[in-house]
Amino acid sequence: DQQVKQNSPSLSVQEGRISILNCDYTNSMFDYFLWYKKYPAEGPTFLISISSIKDKNEDGRFTVFLNKSAKHLSLHIVPSQPGDSAVYFCAALSNSGYALNFGKGTSLLVTP
Amino acid sequence: DARVTQTPRHKVTEMGQEVTMRCQPILGHNTVFWYRQTMMQGLELLAYFRNRAPLDDSGMPKDRFSAEMPDATLATLKIQPSEPRDSAVYFCASRGVESSPLHFGNGTRLTVT
């Protein structure tokens, strides 16, 4: 039962353009959301997060948007760089839970 | 730069053999997680510990998997007997305060033939 869904397994974007990665969730108890980035042969590393009391959080080139009514969040990368090529995982946490629920990931390829 | 350390990085074994994966969480982190990554399921939670006590291992096949924390610096995940369907990358992660993000190790890639 996948409570966090990333419906696009892969995405290809040209360098300098915007990358938009999407994530949907089904559990209305989730109140904290995170994006992780994963390079091959490495573990996921934390990228950015957002609490459910906000609808936007920005950190440099990375912005996460949260639409609670639609149970949807997205990660925007502007401008995209070749070094951003990685698998991006969306994750969610409820205030009563300890463990993150992850989506299956979206593989982003940024081409020069 | 504090890191979660996992050993071995790679393990190839035959079906039926015992496999033990080890994890050293970041010093001072009191919550430890085991995740498994497969193509079909993505990152799925197997078990987690808080202050060395198992809080949830409902994600693990109980008949063959076991997870322990003998001390605060070591977490182990054991599979006995291993099966080809256990082939995956197993990640350990740790966390300090509850609101902080998880820190992952680089994983153990397990292949069971």
Image (cartoon, coloured by chain):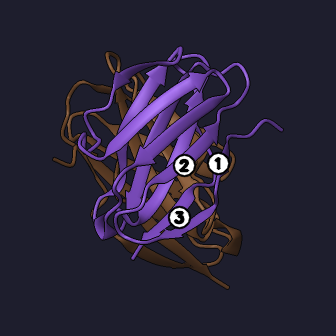
Q: Residue at x 58, y 72 (%)?
A: A17
Q: Residue at x 53, y 38 (%)?
A: B76
Question: Looking at the image, do the residues carrying marks 1 and 3 touch, with CB atoms under 8 Å apart?
Answer: no
* Residue A26, quarter of picture: top left
Mark 3 — residue? B109
- Is A35 placed above or below B88 here? above
Q: Chain of mark 2?
A: B
The answer, for residue A8, to whether it is visible in the render is no
Pointer 1 local density, CA inside 10 Å: few below 14, some 14–19, many at least 20 = many
**Visual hue assigned to chain B:** purple
Mark 2 — residue? B21
Q: Residue at x 46, y 40 (%)?
A: B34
The C terminus of chain B: image quadrant: bottom left
- Is A97 placed above or below A102 here? above
Is residue A41 rendered to the left or right of residue B113?
Answer: right
Report x, y in % for residue B63: 23, 43
**Visual hue assigned to chain A:** brown
Disc 1 secondary structure class: strand
> Going from the N terminus, do you reach mark 2 or mark 1 first?
1
